[in-house]
Amino acid sequence: MIRINYVTIVSKYKKIFILCKAMWNEKLYNALKEPGLKLVLDAGFSCPGRCTFCDNAAFHPAYSTRAKSISQQLDEGIAFHAARGRKEGPYLAYFQSYSNTYAPLERLREVYGEALAHPAISGIVIGTRPDCVDAEKLDYIASLGCARMEYGIESCRDETLLRVRRGHDFACAEKAARETAARGIPVCGHFILGLPGETRETLLEDVKRINALPLDSVKFHQLQLLKGTPMAAEYTERPEDFVRWTLDEYIDLLCDILERLRPDIAVGRLAASVPPRFLAVPGWGVKAATFSDLLDRRLGERQTWQGKIIP
């Protein structure tokens, strides 16, 4: 019987592998393919506490305000995207603002039910915190059969989570991810790169802990220092505690992370941006499409891909 070592073949012919991927217009990482266009919603939830880096106003479009009903936000979201030439449906209701399980179960039934009753909505995405779920809520969400959970894990290090006033430890995130995945609900983890006290070396060590979580997808983005937040004040007082990467350095960091990331984990985001008026420290000013092209090019130049150097 002939045994084929695919790892050896890919390694030996990696230049051909890279070229073929480019010719097929495929990325060198497992990019998340959404089953529909996400419509951001503000359902009027809050959070158990406020992290030092947080300002929700910076992260949602103008049509998404809690003064409007869920149905109205969905209608205006569809019109918002149509005016920008984006294709019609299917759509996902994206409960993004604040912690969208931080309410009694009956409230969750009400808002999720209203979204799913909209004729254009095929599923929901629920952004929340690991400390805002329980068995009863997860059982209900699993019964919907069309939901994905997105947990703001932010860091794998308890000392960092304490410093940013997250209100939970990494063990809480592990527990929430396991219990969610056990019910057949897809799980996405969010992580911020560049929180105080963390470095390139610590972030690369933490990829092992991310790989050990039952995640279907992951989102990374660089730390953005927002005006009026405690973290922006902390940066002014102790800038030496923060690593501020240039665009080139950040892209190289992402390549390093992707090389170590489990290849079956889909990647939904690798950078983020907020309107410049919210920033206490200027950002790179690079559009998402340009950033994606730069990352694809760097991966190709380095002849590397997601999961390449996992032991």
Image: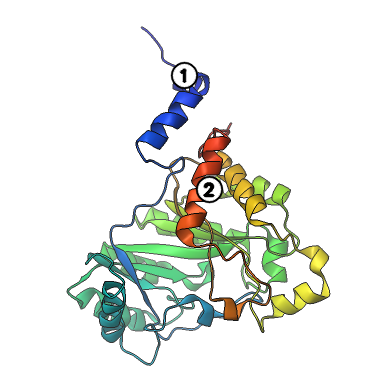
Residue name at image x 63 percent, y 73 percent: 167
Q: Amino acid at mark 1?
A: Ile
Q: Which residue is mark 1?
A: 9
The color scheme shown is rainbow
Residue 123, picture quadrant = bottom left
Q: Quadrant of residue 61?
A: bottom left
Q: Which residue is mark 2?
A: 295
**Which structural element holds mark 1?**
helix
Residue 167, placed above or below residue 191: below
Residue at image location 45% in from the left, 17% down from the top: 5
The one nearer the camera, 127 or 270, is 270
- Which of 19/221 is in front? 19
Residue 199, horizontal then vertical, whole percent: 73, 54
3D distance between C-alphas at marks 2 and 1: 25 Å
**Is residue 269 visible in the rendered structure shown here?**
no
The amino acid pointed to by label 2 is Leu
Task: Tell me the quadrant of the picture where the N terminus can be found.
Answer: top left
Residue 147 placed where, x, y %?
32, 64
* Residue 206 horizontal/vertical position (percent): 64, 49
Badge 2: how crowded within 10 Å, few (<14), some, or many (20+)? many
Residue 293 position within the rendered picture, expressed as x and y whole percent measured from the top left: 48, 50
Q: Does residue 115 appear left or right of residue 131 in this picture? A: left
Secondary structure of the residue carrying numbered label 2: helix
Depth-wise, is mark 2 or mark 1 nearer the camera?
A: 2
